[in-house]
Image (cartoon, helix red, strand yellow):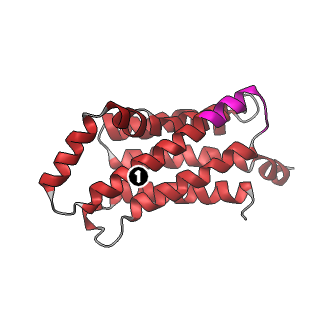
Amino acid sequence: MLKPKTAATLGLLFFVTSYVFFALISLNTQKHIDLAHWFNLIGAVLLFSFNNVFPKNSLNTFACVLTTLGIIAHIGLCTIDFIMWSFGNDAIGSEKLSVQISQTPLIVYPFVIIGPSLLFIGLATHAINFIKTHTISSLMVIIGGPFVGISYFVLKSGPLMLVSCVIFTSGLALLLYRNELEAIKK
């Protein structure tokens, strides 16, 4: 069994790796396995460990709920994306499924539109606990998270999405290892 801090670190590595695939590698070239979504799925599940590594308080409890809901939504989104990937070159079949999902509010909202954002919001809420003591790291998480979505959905920029994800996850890593970094400074 992994320690929570180790699992959280691995989650960050898997999560960033998935965004490298999303930003720089055509998903259509992944013939035998959809690595991007596997890394994203494993990373999101391992990020659950952040619920156990930060100080406990009422804000943390709220952040844990948001993070957990976001992870559940990521699992659903990755499942949808695995099914979409399985269509391969069948653009008609893929489009039919896409239309069906977009016309099903009980799927599209919790698993595509709103739900996955809750993972970023939950982790950003965890970071708010450190805004006074670790301002820069906290702001990296709080600002980086929304920019992952904005850069992808609004600006349609894979490289900017990757940079935003690196800032977001780097901020989380700095918060995760804050005690060790402070000990090194002293």
Location of the N terminus (image quadrant): bottom right
Dot 1 alpha-carbon crowd within 10 angstroms: few under 14, some 14 to 19, many 20 or more: many
Which residue ends up furthest to the right in the rendered image?
186
Residue bearing mark 1:
78
Which quarter of the picture shows residue 30? bottom left
Query: What predominant SS class does the magenta segment belong to?
Result: helix
In the image shown, does 104 or 40 lie closer to the viewer?
Answer: 104
Residue 169 position within the rendered picture, expressed as x and y whole percent measured from the top left: 57, 48
- For badge 1, the amino acid type reads Cys
Residue 44 position within the rendered picture, expressed as x and y whole percent measured from the top left: 54, 51
**Left or right side of 62 for 75:** left
Which residue ends up furthest to the bottom in the rendered image?
32
Residue at horizontal 46 percent and vertical 36 percent from the top: 115
**Left or right side of 55 for 37:** left
Q: Is residue 6 magenta?
A: no
* Residue 23 visible, this orientation: no
**Tag count:** 1
Residue at horizontal 57 percent and vertical 53 percent from the top: 45
Which residue ends up furthest to the left in the rendered image?
92
Q: Secondary structure at mark 1?
A: helix
Q: Is residue 59 magenta?
A: yes
Residue at horizontal 24 percent and vertical 33 percent from the top: 103
Which quarter of the picture shows residue 2? bottom right
In the image shown, does 27 or 66 lie closer to the viewer?
Answer: 66
**Left or right side of 4 for 170:** left
Residue at horizontal 36 percent and vertical 64 percent from the top: 34
> Which residues are the magenta region?
55-65
